[in-house]
Image (tube, helix red, strand yellow):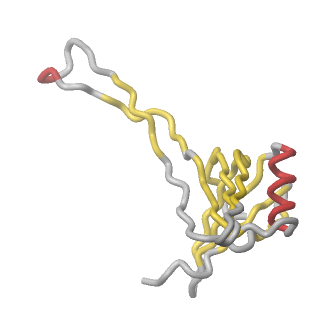
Amino acid sequence: MDIGFGVKVEIGQGAIPSWTELAKVGDVEFPTIEYEEIDVTNMQSANRQKETIRGLADWGDFTVPMKYVPNSATDELLNDILDSGETVKIRITVPGTTPYVETFSGYLKTYARTLPVGEAMECEATFRINAKVANV
């Protein structure tokens, strides 16, 4: 058991990804797959009970909270990706003797920046995840 300190989130661009680490990342929560439930209840359903089957998978959104540094490499990268609308790879690496890595494909849905008066500036990049992909 360990703490999450040192987790890296990287963005990969191109067919053979060129990876860029996002700076000043906060708490990270892995994308979670969720399956639709399809109602197949019918007049012969046993004991008047609803019946469902598993439908299509949805990875949902993956949000990366960060400290905001205007005009930094991370800020410029995220603005460029948001403007281009390109699909990118998102790689999450958990450090350790044997690092654990998961890679996803998706697009940048939102890039929100917060500028509070008396606290650190923050931002969030929210990616819409399309699929989990082989680690590259």
Q: Position of residue 130 (x, y in %)?
A: 64, 44
Image point 33% across, 22% down: which residue?
A: 40
Image quarter for residue 22?
A: bottom right
User: From the viewer's perspective, is residue 82 above or below residue 26?
Assistant: above
Q: Nearer the viewer, residue 16 or 62?
A: 62
Q: Nearer the viewer, residue 22 or 40?
A: 22
User: Can you say which quadrant of the picture contains the C terminus?
Assistant: bottom right
Q: Quadrant of the N terminus?
A: bottom left
Q: Is residue 12 left or right of residue 62?
A: right
Q: Residue furthest front?
A: 117
Q: Is residue 7 left or right of residue 107?
A: left
- Residue 10 at x, y = what percent? 73, 66
Q: Position of residue 68 (x, y in %)?
A: 74, 67
Q: Which residue appears farthest toward the left when viewing the image? A: 47
What residue is rendered at 32% in x and 29% in y? 52
| Left or right placement of residue 122 versus residue 34 in this view | right
Looking at the picture, does residue 59 appear above or below residue 9? above
Considering every residue shown, the one lying at the far bottom of the view is 97
Q: In this image, 17 relative to 135: left or right?
A: right
In the picture shown, does residue 93 fall above or below 126? below
Q: Position of residue 95 (x, y in %)?
A: 60, 81
Q: Residue at x 39, y 32 (%)?
A: 37
Which residue is rendered at x = 82% and y = 61% of the image?
17
Q: How many marks?
A: 0
Residue nearest the viewer, comparing 83 with 88? 83
